[in-house]
Image: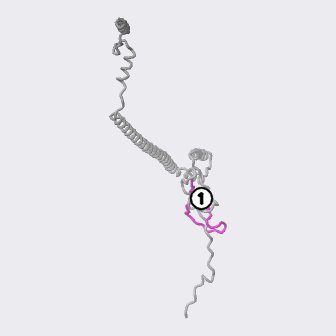
Amino acid sequence: MDEDKYLNNTSQQFGEATEVKQAMNSDSPAPSNVNEPGNEVTETAANVSEDTVMPTPDNGVTATEATTVDTAALAQMSQQIESLKAQLEERSNQYMRIAADFENYRKRMVKEKEDLEAQVKRNTITELLPVVDNFERARSQIKPQNDGEMGIHKSYQGVYKLLVDCLKRLGVSPMRPEGQPFDPNLHEAVMREPTDEHPEGTVLEELIRGYYLGDRVLRHSMVKVAAPKEDMPSSEENQSPPANS
């Protein structure tokens, strides 16, 4: 009797424990679905897992190739820059040479123009000098005897003075060689006069006037130059040698 009672109590306790366990299992919340759209944490974790790519040997080879391509591109760009620098330097040198040539050409043309103008001026004035010579010759030779001749003399002397003033404004100046040593660069000796009053080679007289144009000789002066006076031969030299008998 006591054993039957014990067994019944044990069965009842075991049944209550089973019901409690079932009730606890029925009261626990349902397991959450990680794939439901409402679960933001689950979606973020899924996205991170999808975007993250684990490094593989293939990815390492691609990065090395990209680095090599970048180095080659930089080398090519550096080469192009050096080539452009060389071209720029060459063009600059060409420009400097052209500028120097043009400046030399400009100076040469200015010099040639000045020389041409000076040559034309010299030729024109040289053609007028004989007119001046005739006026001077007339002034020295013509001696007016009456009022009429004096009026004519004053008239052409006025023309002569006007012509001389024009030549002075152009830079023409006369030479004054009398009493100076003979200079072949300035004078042209056309006569020699023996004298002991002046040293040999002294200009005694200007026969045709010479002129300067600026600091250059326009026309040489034709002059008479002093020469040493020759001694008369002695009487003994003049005597003829005796005839042989």
Q: Is residue 227 left or right of residue 51?
A: right
In this view, 90 is above or below 36: below
Q: Is residue 23 visible?
A: no
Disc 1, SS: strand
Magenta highlight range: 187-211
Dividing the picture into quadrants, the one containing residue 179 is: bottom right
Q: Residue at x 64, y 68 (%)?
A: 195
* Residue farthest to the front, as pictured: 1
Q: Would you place residue 209 above or below residue 193 in this image?
A: above
- Give the tally of numbered discs: 1
- Quarter that holds the C terminus: bottom right
Residue 29 or residue 110, whichever sits in front: 29
Per the image, the residue denoted by label 1 is 206
Q: Quadrant of residue 210?
A: bottom right
Q: Please identify the dominant SS of the magenta region.
A: strand
Residue 38 covered by magenta stretch = no
Name the residue type under label 1: Glu
Instruction: Indicate yes or no whether the magenta region holds residue 204.
Output: yes
Q: Horizontally, is 238 left or right of 81 in the view?
A: right
Q: Residue at x 63, y 80 (%)?
A: 234
Q: Residue furthest left?
A: 58
Q: Quadrant of residue 90?
A: top left
Vertical placement of 17 versus 194: above or below?
A: above
The N terminus, quarter of image: top left
